[in-house]
Structures are given as C-alpha cells and as structure tokens.
Image (cartoon, helix red, strand yellow):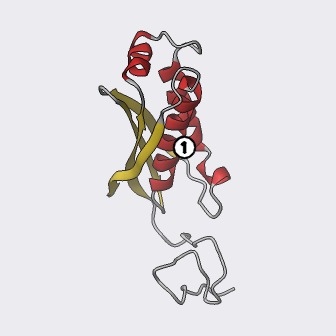
Amino acid sequence: MSKKKSSNPRFSHLDPQGKARMVDVTGKPDQYRKAVATARLSCQPGTLRALRRQALPKGDVLTVAQIAGIQAAKRTAELIPLCHSLCLSHVAIQFQLTSRTVEVHCTAETRAGTGVEMEALTGATLAALALYDMCKAIDRTMTIEGVRVVEKIKK
C-alpha cells in the first residue's frame, strides 16, 4: 500500500477520496511533547466554600475529579475516533478555586510521533464533568466553559 497525502492538507483525517482515516505517523520521530488544557466550572460561592471545606455529600470531590481526569487522559484513544493510542509519561490535574469558578488544568506529556493535545483536553474536560456530577446535588446553576489548549510544546 502506498502512503498518500490528503488532497486537502487542512484536514489530515481525510484521505484523497474525502473519507475519514487515521493519520499515519509511522515515519515521524518520537519527540518530547507536552500539552496543557484548561476548563472552567462556574458555580455558586456556597459550592466553592463546600469544596474548600470538603463538606460536600459525596466526600473528597477534588481528589475524585483529579483521578477521573487522569484516567480520562489515559483513555483518550478509546473515546475519540481516529486518535492515536499514546503511552503517556505524565498526566497531572490541578485545580485553582476562585470566588466563582474552579479552574481545571490538565498537563499531559509523552515521547511520541504525535501530540498530546487531545489527551490534555480530555483530562481537563472529564475532571470538570466529575466536579459537576459530584456538586450538582447542591448547585443546579453550574456551567462548564472555556475548554481550550493553553500550551503546546514539541522538542
């Protein structure tokens, strides 16, 4: 089989006939790659006070959300079609609580032939979803927003 580039280089997940395909990264060298993504959970001040005091009915919500985000980043290829399976060398989930939000930061790192943006985005999003799930009993006004990649490194 010959390797053909997509007829539209802007859409690397399309073959020359316009059909979906996994991008072939076989020839790309392994390089250190890092991505950081964020998501923001907006909620009531009382919800944030309960989070800080670990006083929510479901227990240590931040630790559970941290584990959910790490687990999600590791399983990105199972969740998003055409994503490459990556051997992640590091995933970290951190939270920053403000007066009205929980800022979720997910850092993903690997040595591979393709980037880790999707893993970082998946980790940040799932950590925010876990927070939402565990806080919804006391706050029905929550929203998740601002999911984005804020840093991308390739060396």
Q: Is residue 94 left or right of residue 134?
A: left
SS of the residue under disc 1: helix
Q: Residues within 10 Å of mark 1 (few under 14, many from 20)?
A: many
Reply above or below: 90 against 77: above
Image coordinates of residue 27 in percent, x first then y, are 51, 73
Tag 1: amino acid: Ala
Please state if 75 lies on the left or on the right of 141 as rendered: right
Confirm whether residue 116 shows in the render.
no
* Residue 145 seen in render: yes
**89 vs 44, nearest the viewer:** 44
Left or right, 145 with respect to 152, comes to right
What is the x, y in percent for residue 40? 40, 39
Q: Residue 41, position in %: x, y?
A: 43, 36
* 51 to 140, vertically: above or below: above
From the image, which quarter does the N terminus lie in? bottom right
Q: Is residue 18 above or below residue 119?
A: below
Question: Toward the viewer: 92 or 127?
Answer: 127
- Residue at 64% from the left image edge and 74% from the top image edge: 21
> In the image, what residue occupies the spot 59% across and 80% down?
14
The residue that label 1 is drawn on is 73
- Residue farthest to the front, as pictured: 141
Of the 4 image quadrants, the one containing the C terminus is bottom left
Instruction: Work out whether residue 24 or residue 106 is closer to the camera in this orientation and state it.
Output: 106
Report the number of discs: 1
What residue lies at 59% left-to-right and 22% top-to-bottom?
Answer: 137
**Residue at the spot 50% in from the left edge and 54% down from the top edge:** 118
Does residue 123 appear left or right of residue 150 in this picture? right
